[in-house]
Image (cartoon, grey):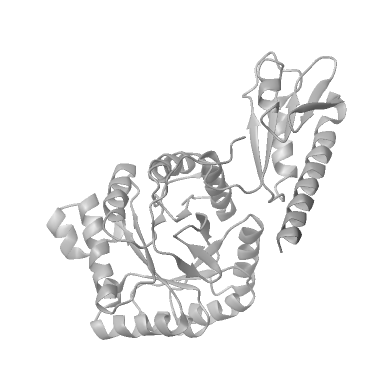
Amino acid sequence: MHSHSPIKRRVSRKIHVGNVAVGGDAPISVQSMTNTNTNDVAATVAQIKRLEDAGADIVRVSVPDMDAAEAFGRIKKLSNIPLVADIHFDYKIALRVAELGVDCLRINPGNIGREDRVRAVVSAARDNGIPIRIGVNAGSLEKDLQKKYGEPTPAALVESAMRHIDHLDRLDFQEYKVSVKASDIFMAVAAYRELAGRIEQPLHLGITEAGGLRSGTVKSSIGLGMLLMDGIGDTIRVSLAADPVEEIKVGYDMLKSLKLRAKGINFIACPSCSRQNFDVIKTMNELETRLEDVMTPLNVSVIGCVVNGPGEAKETDVGLTGGSPANLVYLDGKPATKLTNETLVEDLERLIRAKVAEKEAREADTIIRQG
């Protein structure tokens, strides 16, 4: 498998959300948002842990009021990964979470109100080394822009973003990233493309309110896929009406398919047909579930018969080709062993885990030699 992506990424300024770099030459980060009640510290911390285990780089938490701000402080102490606080309207909440160790503030300076309030928030961000995310959304454009454009348009989204950006520019604050989300793919893509040429800061991509698990995945994949193919985007959030852990999985699958990020197992599987010598769909479902904990990049092909099986297996770390009376497993492109259907999943899982361990040992060895 050629691991290099042909995509040439837009050059952006690098900022840091906690210890995670966003923009510049940093890998595209994958984030999600908690949907627990922020005041329920235990539930929120548990969900953040699940997101972290799924591979989330950054998690956003909504902080609607001062009680939630205090809860956020406790959540932050109990979590390992960078947390972004989502704040609307009340600048005092932003000041409080800045004191409590937030890693990034999601605000729209225009919603915060008077210039002195914006200045107070920016000073707190500057003093604590906290970046800001300007988050423009087609569903919450300023009244005068709604009136000017009649309805949300790409130009309206960009004008709103530039207005917020101007606030930060006037205060000489450059540590920010921007999103211009819409639930309409064409609108979001056009807005991001326009904005990408106007600022040097990193862009946070998302198709907002994309929908349920399947329809939202499709919509996000098309919208974000078009932008990522253009080299646009430094961090992504897939918005799904589903368990937030699914957002992380879909995000990684998206980046994996474009060879922009390798994490965990990249499965190549045939859709299965009557030529199959084992139940491909059942095998794939079981393997994906069993191997979800693996974060080391590995390419595994699961092909039901000998038509494409050997060809795919030559390109992958572990390849299974259906055969009769037994299925053939290739390791590093060479035929290695035969497996029968009775214990196929167990045997294959064991071989894959052995390959992962071998790869991890090799990488550790390289690091020691270089170090």
- Name above or below for residue 13 compared with residue 243: below
Residue 152 appears in the picture as rendered: no
Q: Position of residue 371 (x, y in %)?
A: 71, 64
Q: Position of residue 209 (x, y in %)?
A: 40, 51
Q: Which residue occupies the extreme front position in the image?
A: 370
- Name above or below for residue 2 compared with residue 62: above
Residue 44 as seen in the image, left or right of residue 189: right
Residue 68 as seen in the image, left or right of residue 205: right
- Name above or below for residue 88 compared with residue 180: below
Residue 340 lies in what quarter of the image?
top right
- Name above or below for residue 142 compared with residue 180: below
Name the foreground residue: 100 vs 234: 234
Residue 264 as seen in the image, left or right of residue 336: left
Residue at image location 49% in from the left, 50% down from the top:
241
Name the foreground residue: 250 vs 323: 323
The quadrant of the rendering that contains the N terminus is top right
Q: Position of residue 304 (x, y in %)?
A: 71, 21
Residue at image location 71% in from the left, 21% down from the top:
310
Q: Which residue occupies the extreme left position in the image?
A: 148
Residue at image location 75% in from the left, 43% down from the top:
290
Q: Position of residue 308 (x, y in %)?
A: 65, 19
Question: How many numbered discs, if any?
Answer: 0
Residue 161 appears in the picture as rendered: yes
